[in-house]
Amino acid sequence: MKMGLRWFGEGYDTVSLEKIRQVPGVSGVITTLYGAMPGEDWEKEKVLALKRSAENAGLEILGIESVNIHDDIKIGLPTRDQYIENYISTIRTLSECGIHLICYNFMPVFDWTRTDLAKPRHDGSTVLAYDQRVIDQMDPDNLFASMEARSQGHVLPGWEPERLANLKEPFEKYKDVDEEKLWANLKYFLEAIMPACEKYGVKMAIHPDDPGWSVFGLPRIITSGENLRRMVDMVPSPCNGVTLCTGSLGTNPNADLPGIIHLLKGKIFFAHVRNMEHTAPGQFEESAHLSSDGSFDMFAIVKALYDTGFDGVMRPDHGRMIWGEQAMPGYGLYDRALGSQYLLGLWEAITKLSHC
Ligand SMILES: [Mn+2]
């Protein structure tokens, strides 16, 4: 297992690589070409520059989060083949740069969704939160405007203004795409790219939808352990796997997270491990990573990963904003550093006890 921290790149992230380097046990970053639009064929020079900046700071690039999928692929338009070709070219480029893990998602239009980016917690920290009642009273344009207004000038990952400036058009394009069509389009995409992934040794790790249900009537399919299992079985390949994101799968209060980890044994290439608190039906807020601060049993989650032989990349996920830090919502340094130490502590204890 390798522990990393997500990093958004020079000029985008308030957290420097030098600071990440000082978090014990963190050997690398998960990053992306921030500013690259979905569908773009990534330039090798830009990837090499990204790699050099990480390596100059004594860190490895452990994976890319994300190489986003163009909506035409999700919708299944004839133009998808060109975007798939670009994607395959990017896979080859990343492999040539020594990067062998890609996290991506298959959510239509919107990426992760929250209704509050700075909700106060009992301890004075602030966190990302979701309230279905707020979504139900909102039209999608307002959601984008409110996410942008509350992002304190940061471009939130997956919420690029260029792409979301005119939401009416993408909604119109998805009007004939139901869940089964989206499944078929995902299968088409995976069948097209897997030979290249195998050839170049690049693992694809799909990220679950967040939250794990339909938002604004758009279809969502990567919403549960069963559906993740369907996804990996649909296109069998050693390179077709998942990002186990406890916070996203755990938006369903009934999700059995250790059970899902066992169900996906051998197929988890990347793990986002964090805690959250369910406060009421349809409402949740993020919390500190510690089990006692939220609704999840973090020991049981890390133990399930250990017991199933997980040997991929792990990162703490969204953190609280603490100690007056000003940073991208969910991605400050302090609470994610605390989270990484807690996860490494659990991992060390579980490893040593299993050898007693
Ligand atoms: Mn995640």
Image (cartoon, rainbow, N blue to C red):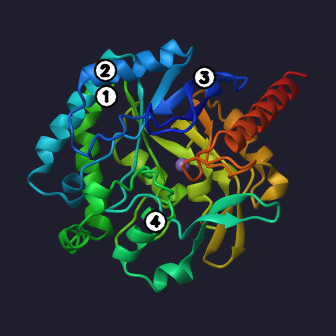
Considering the numbered disc 2 on the image, is that residue within a helix, a strand or a loop? helix
Q: Which residue is mark 2?
A: 200
Q: Earlier in the sequence, mark 4 or mark 1?
A: 4
Instruction: Look at mark 3 in the image and give the residue it sits on.
Output: 18
Disc 4: residue Cβ within 8 A of ligand 1's nearest atom: no
Is tag 3's residue or tag 4's residue first in the polypeptide sequence?
3
The amino acid sitting under disc 2 is Tyr
* Residue labelled 1 has its Cβ within 8 Å of some atom of ligand 1: no
How far apart are the alpha carbons under marks 1 and 2? Answer: 5 Å
Q: Is 348 located above or below residue 121 in the figure?
A: above
Q: Position of residue 92 (x, y in %)?
A: 26, 23
Q: Which residue is mark 4?
A: 149
Q: Nearer the viewer, mark 2 or mark 3?
A: 3
Q: How far is mark 2 from mark 4, CA to CA?
A: 41 Å
Q: Residue 233 vs residue 93: left or right?
A: right
Viewer-proximal residue, 148 or 176?
148
The kind of secondary structure element at disc 4 is helix
Left or right: 113 as drawn, with respect to 317: left
Name the amino acid type tagged 3. Glu
Q: Of the residues under marks 3 and 1, which one precedes in the sequence?
A: 3
Residue 254 appears in the rendering: no
Q: How far is disc 3 from disc 1 in space, using C-alphas?
A: 32 Å
Residue 24 found in image quarter: top right
